[in-house]
Amino acid sequence: VATMALTPWHTLVAALWAGITCGFLYTFGTFGSALKAKFDFTTEISTISMCQVASGLITFTSGLLVDWMGIRATLLLGAIVNSGSWFFFGLIANGLVTVESPVAAFSFLVAFATWGGACVTGAVFTTLAKNFRASSAGAIGIAKAWVGVASGVATIVFVGFFPTDDKSSERLGYLWFLSAACLLGVLLAAPFLQILPPQAPLDGLCVPPVWQYRVLTLITLGLIAVTATASLLHDSLSGSEMAALSTTILVIVLCPALLLCPGRRSRHTPASDAREAAALQGDGAPLLSAAERPISPWASGPGKMLRRVDAWLLWLTIFALQTGGIVLTTNLSSITDSRGGGGSADAAEATAVFSCAQSLGRLFGGRLSDLAVRRSFTRPFCLAVVTFVMCGAHLILCIPGREALFLGVGLAGWAFGSMYPTMIVTISDLFGTERIGSNYMVYDGSPSASASILMGKWLATAVYEAHTEPGKTSCTGHLCYRDTFLSVAGLQLLAALCAMALSLRSRIVYRTCFWAPNASQNRVEGTSDPSSCALDRQKMLGNASPDSTASGGGSDAASSSPQLPQPIRGAHGAADSSPNRAAVEVTS
């Protein structure tokens, strides 16, 4: 049995534990009613929650910190800021510290906590994008699913062990739990969350590499199922039953650690590496391995990236998809009430449907986009398909009736969740992994904040009030949000055009960096010749003659055709074709 060595799977398990703390930010509703009752807030609660949303406009700075400070330093800084903000929030909320303006203090602290969580987010997904460079969609999808289910996990665990009424001041003790959980999750993950060298081993664990994704997917599905069940049934369950479900959730959260038990390390050969790569990549057209893959011709940091029209086409697509989800999450309770639903029961069921659907979308959306890329579709094309699904969901929501409500909410949730892993991998594909932290955070916060303020709040509120009868304080009927749904559906069609335009423009990137006619033959023969792959790509693009490419390109050749990016190289400048590198980057 080999001694324990850090593998990409260690960093993925660590990313799950750190990443789930990022989702704890979205549990304001768990203690919001208690905070409102204790301080006699009315509209002030909306002000506090809006500050949390608006802080997304500045969370891009956390990505810059990842590039500047590195993974571990940014991770720990984010955990301290996040945990500390909730701790001071708890001091004020529980009356242990008195301030002159509680609303201003709460608004500042919740915005600061959001920024700290963004630092953790940037560190986590930068690590996964770089350690699983050849097929990061699966790893990122699993981690994003844990982020999506995090709010339900935190709420059920706390309520299961500390049952309290929603409006009771005792519920504010949740803030202590939140502060401790945000810090503990990151401290547990910090020793393992780092960028691994190309020579890091892939196996040596008790579970073979080809089974790691499958087992982690099953664990994630179990976490989603138990959390959804507890959320739907918590009013009808006894205290002991809720405690048992809370314990089950904690056990499931810790289960990924079992996959890291050391096992026998296999002997790497070209044939075994090829088999593992084929098992992880699945069927379809062969892709270039990470060792063969050149840097994207669009690779850049956020400054240069945002000068390209392609970056803004992607931003508008993400903005539209986030709008489709945020309009529902912000107004779902009011939507169910206005349609004549069964009050809080229907709202809880609709919320559970959206939560489960978006978690499943996060889990499988990225891997579905991988299948599309292997069949010679670009990943932005996948985003276009998702916008059509979101458009259809909001058109269905225009139809009266309970069935239309749940179908529309489910489809919108799936599209909303699928967008997240597909977005991250698209950014990595188009603009490279070197600055993935800062590039990704441009798209993580600002589209969400803009969608929340412009569409989730202002547009939805204006439409709702326009259909409220004079003398009444609430609107009744499917017309209350119909114009909002139609506006969101129209926005999805505009986003689909943007995504299709980006898909056409980005085909040169995918031809250069992903699709290779001879990759399948190289895998079968156990060879990996980056220069021959570059030659084939240049032939395919028609940018250079075979003679000029093979000869290394004299002055005439260099002046007559643009140079393609060079293959990934090792520490000493030579193309790295070691078996261990292939094992880490091809099959991850």
Image (spheres, rainbow, N blue to C red):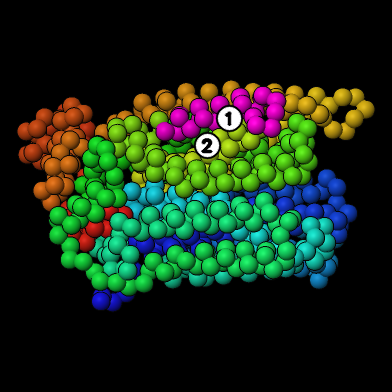
- Residue 528 can be seen in this image: yes
Q: Few, some or many C-alpha atoms within 10 Å of disc 1 (few <14, some 14-19, many ≥20)?
A: many
Secondary element type, mark 2: helix
Q: Give the percent coordinates (x, y) of residue 127.
A: 41, 57
Instruction: Decide which of 213, 587 is in the foreground and name it.
Output: 213
The quarter holding residue 542 reads top left
Amino acid type of the residue that numbered disc 1 sits on in the rendered structure: Ala
The magenta span reads 382-404
At x 25%, y 71%, the residue is 264
> Circle 2 sits on which residue?
415
At x 32%, y 73%, the residue is 262
The quarter holding residue 520 reads top left
Secondary element type, mark 1: helix
**CA–CA distance between discs 2 and 1?**
9 Å
Quadrant containing the N terminus is bottom left
Q: Few, some or many C-alpha atoms within 10 Å of disc 2 (few <14, some 14-19, many ≥20)?
A: many
> Circle 1 sits on which residue?
393
At x 31%, y 68%, the residue is 205
Q: Are marks 2 and 1 in contact (CB under 8 Å)?
A: yes
Q: Give the percent coordinates (x, y) of residue 159.
A: 70, 63
Amino acid type of the residue that numbered disc 2 sits on in the rendered structure: Ala
Q: Give the percent coordinates (x, y) of residue 370.
A: 35, 41
Residue occupying the far right of the picture: 471
Instruction: Decide which of 162, 492 is in the foreground and name it.
Output: 162
Q: Is residue 433 above or below residue 244?
A: above
Q: Is residue 218 left or right of residue 31?
A: left
Earlier in the chain: of badge 2 and badge 1, it is 1
- Residue 463 can be seen in this image: no
Q: Is residue 312 above or below residue 144?
A: above
Q: Is 459 covered by the magenta stretch?
A: no
Q: Give the percent coordinates (x, y) of residue 63.
A: 49, 52
At x 13%, y 51%, the residue is 526
